[in-house]
Image (cartoon, rainbow, N blue to C red):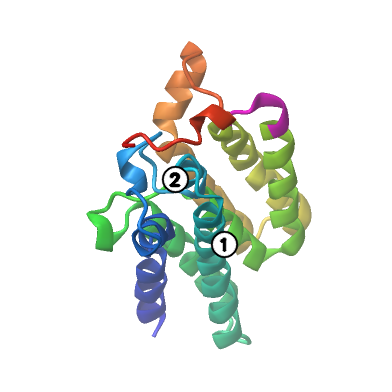
Amino acid sequence: MIYLFLFIAYCLGSLSFAILVSKFMKIDDPRSYGSGNAGATNVMRSGNKKAALLTLLGDLLKGTFVVLFTRYYFHGFNSGEVIVSLCGIMVVIGHIYPVFFKFKGGKGVATSIGVLLGFNLWLALLLAITWLVVFKFSKISSFAALIATILAPVYAYMLMGNNAYFGATLIIAFFVLYRHKANIVRLISGQESKFTKEQNEPKNK
């Protein structure tokens, strides 16, 4: 049963809402313009704010759903917290490496926040606030995501201590940081672009 939940978590994570919403709303595939990332920030560059919002909500809520449903099902189990944590990790891995889209997915930020929301409400709020504050001053989405990701394990430890959820947060942070390796290189070299209104135009128009 545990392996089934892990498999389902991965499959749900593999549902890339950036791609699905774009197809449904008949706009360009997000992998074909902007940063090429299948995520809400890049969908925003298409100029379709509704599509970006739906992408954000879909990617976030799938993470929260997996955690909350798994927590409900395994409530009272001795290893329930560990199982919930593993499923949280799997849904993020599914988002980053989706089996339905040739293992080319998003960078996992929204889904990670959704998972951490399921772990602890205050943890998710701290991360969202961190992202918003850093983005407001830097206008660089990847930089805001990196700072929030780095601080995620710190916040998790402060709020929950050294438990399974903290361990899962640490692992999730590693995957998200790894997925941002190209952004890190551009940030170090000063070549990472800022997110501006002028970018809200599709590349293939």
Number of marks present in the image shown: 2
Instruction: Say whether residue 55 is visible.
Output: yes
Main SS of the magenta part reads helix
Q: Earlier in the sequence, mark 1 or mark 2?
A: 1
The magenta span reads 136-140
Residue 78: image x %, image y %? 58, 81
Name the residue rendered at 69%, 47% in the picture. Answer: 127
> What element does badge 2 sit on?
loop
The quadrant in which the N terminus is found is bottom left
Name the residue rendered at 49%, 57% in the picture. Answer: 55
Residue 174: image x %, image y %? 48, 43
Residue beneath disc 2: 107
> What element does badge 1 sit on?
helix
Q: Is residue 139 magenta?
A: yes
CB atoms at circles 1 and 2 under 8 Å apart?
A: no
Residue beneath disc 1: 57
Name the residue rendered at 69%, 56% in the picture. Answer: 124
Of marks 1 and 2, the one in the foreground: 1
In front here: 32 or 166?
32
Left or right: residue 26 versus residue 44 is: left
